[in-house]
Amino acid sequence: MTKDNGKKIGIKDIALKAGVSIGTVDRVLHMRGDVSAATQSRVLAIVEEYGYTPNVIARTLSSKKQLKIGIVIPDSSDRNPYWEMPILGISKAGGELSRFNTGIIEAYFDASVEASFREAFDKVLAQNPDGMVLNPVFGHNSLEEIRQLDEAEIPYVSIEVNVEGIDKLGHFGQDAQQSGRVAASLVAAGVPELSETLIIKQTSKKIFSKHIESRISGFLEYFSESSHKDTSLQVRPVIVEIDLSLKGEPETTLQQTLSQHPDIKAVFIPNSRAFLFADFIEQHNLEGYFVVGYDIIDQNIAHLEKGTIAFLIGHRPHVQAYNAIMALAEHLLSGKEIPAVNYSQIDIINKENITYYKNN
Amino acid sequence: MTKDNGKKIGIKDIALKAGVSIGTVDRVLHMRGDVSAATQSRVLAIVEEYGYTPNVIARTLSSKKQLKIGIVIPDSSDRNPYWEMPILGISKAGGELSRFNTGIIEAYFDASVEASFREAFDKVLAQNPDGMVLNPVFGHNSLEEIRQLDEAEIPYVSIEVNVEGIDKLGHFGQDAQQSGRVAASLVAAGVPELSETLIIKQTSKKIFSKHIESRISGFLEYFSESSHKDTSLQVRPVIVEIDLSLKGEPETTLQQTLSQHPDIKAVFIPNSRAFLFADFIEQHNLEGYFVVGYDIIDQNIAHLEKGTIAFLIGHRPHVQAYNAIMALAEHLLSGKEIPAVNYSQIDIINKENITYYKNN
DNA sequence: ATAATTTCCGTTAACGTACACGGTAATTCA
DNA sequence: TGAATTACCGTGTACGTTAACGGAAATTAT
């Protein structure tokens, strides 16, 4: 299709071939008008034929205005330490992009207060970003804000939460269902005589936590499959919901549940709070629970190293954020397409390989 | 230390502050001489004071000569499909670096023929690379070649095999000992009543396979630790060595070993040939072996999905190659330091999470 | 003392792109 | 028909750096 005779073609070459000046080529390339239909098509034909792509380096050097990428994600100062992770990816991306004269505008919101999302969103939008990265934890409730981007023709990508029906360039997240299956496979391999399995959910009306449900669904799906039918009969999920905002929780519910279900051997916690259960069994000197949780945060790491948690599932939130930003930047800088769905890897982590997952 | 009043300083600003022309600044920056000691120190003082770092973008655009990074690694057309993996990382790095006007010169050698290393090495060296990435599988036997780099003052990094005593900028590899421990931890968790464990080595006199030994060492170490003393008594490693170049192997040795040791439940294969054992037990309709192997190559993936292999350990050879090249490029382009040792993550892979490890 | 070198340094043209600014035709208006 | 638009396009400068070129001053040689 495109001619690939060695060198890549430049705006100057196009001008030469089309018999016009580089100014004219620039005008058609940027659709700034003032070009006759004839020359325009002539230039475009050459662009097409030689597969011209702008030299990002030269463009960066020339362009005085810096590209701005806005980011709206939950605050890590929140009680949930999970939100610290994407920030690492943001810094990394910011560092690499700074030399391309593109800056990052970040604003954080309280994931438990819906109004704070709008606030952070507007704050970023006010600075006229050229593109945005969102973690729309409130899902469809934030549609009104997101629509503004469509109107202003600001391209955006989402991370973590995939909201259907919005006009995003792409989504960067996890395959939650599959990660539940991974957790299940570890339980299946690690607990020889499976009986009751405890699954702990967290009550939270606000946040869009579809992926928590998907993880559980994947977990149960695994055992319901033909190849594990023999074990599935014995899995007997015990699903409890705990409202951490209540005083005395999770103590009360855990104590009650464990005494009522003495056969529980495996515990699956489909969110980043596995350490709470681990804290509990540690304080009560309980043993013999095979605990599988999510996310590489300090509290979980500590228990992994002590052996209270057997496995953690990770999905690289920092890489998700990094990839989202870089993909958006590449799109903005050189028009590269972004795949609709970008799932990150599902990592299996235990005491022995945690070391190399810690700081990146 | 360095002044950070907003804008980053440029060569022009330095010239202004020092009361000289940009030509002079450029001369001291590049140590091209023809500058009096007085002005030189004056310029350097300002460079120091304002923490000047060259603009890589402008440099790339200006510099007519392209940077060349040489790569010498084993050939993937060899019988060992493992060597295909780093190549993926090389292509990725090559793509990203092409816009910085830096090219990659690759040469492959036969990992079973020592002379071929010298050949590939010389081929790359003849093209005067500005830096090199080596996989010195023959270890100290290649010292003679590597010394040439020191003499020619060509910086280099190593991947996979860490040869002591050479003046490399850094090494990109795996913590083989620790990955053996990871394998052991999976066996410990997955096989309830451990007894004899088969460890299969491959005879090979040529290649520098220290890491294979380290993997085994890590594997055994895990069970010998206090916390697993109870099980360790039963692990009883059965280590066999197979020479694949012999006719009838590995069939003969495997058949013999398995019949002699009926108690074997777990099999640890510290190289990428786990699929050979899996092929064997599949053909003979054997069951009940918990197989842990290395490397995400097609043959292993197939068995992972069928269940013949329980777990694979991965260490991202493509990322290693990618990181090595990028670090070297950053060093060459902007003088960034390279850590002495860079270990990649140790991935635990089973049937459920293999999907997202396949194509990257 | 004059010529021939050195030593030291400034000027300038790239690199590929962006964009403001003029300028020349063709067209329309009076 | 002459003036005022409009449509279209070229020129020039800038971005930060590299590096060739050349020129003035200082030094050495004759």
Image (cartoon, coloured by chain):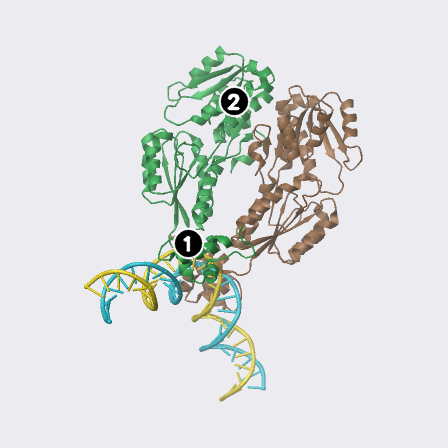
Chain colours: A green, B brown, C yellow, D cyan
Determine crowd level at label 2: few under 14, some 14-19, many 20+ residues with C-alpha closer than 10 A: many
Q: What kind of element bears circle 1?
A: helix
Do the residues under discs 2 and 1 have CB atoms within 8 angstroms? no
- Lower sequence index among marks 2 and 1: 1
Of B191 and A138, nearer the camera is A138
**Which residue is label 2 attached to?**
A219
Which x, y percent locates residue B85? Answer: 62, 41
Where B287 falls versus B73 (above or below)? above
Q: Nearer the viewer, mark 2 or mark 1?
A: 1
Residue at horizontal 61 percent and vertical 51 percent from the top: B156
Q: Hey, what amino acid is under mark 1?
A: Leu
Where B221 falls versus B163 (above or below)? above
Q: Hey, what amino acid is under mark 2?
A: Phe
Give the CA separation, mark 2 to mark 1.
52 Å
**Which residue is label 1 attached to?**
A29
Of D6 and B256, nearer the camera is D6
Determine crowd level at label 1: few under 14, some 14-19, many 20+ residues with C-alpha closer than 10 A: some
Which x, y percent locates residue B82? Answer: 66, 39
Of D13 and A282, nearer the camera is D13
Which x, y percent locates residue B185? Answer: 62, 27
Residue A303 — which label?
none
Q: What kind of element bears circle 2?
A: helix
Q: Is residue A351 visible?
A: yes
Q: In the image, A144: left or right of A321?
A: left
Residue at horizontal 50 percent and vertical 31 percent from the top: A296
Residue at horizontal 56 percent and vertical 14 percent from the top: A234
Which x, y percent locates residue B182? Answer: 62, 30
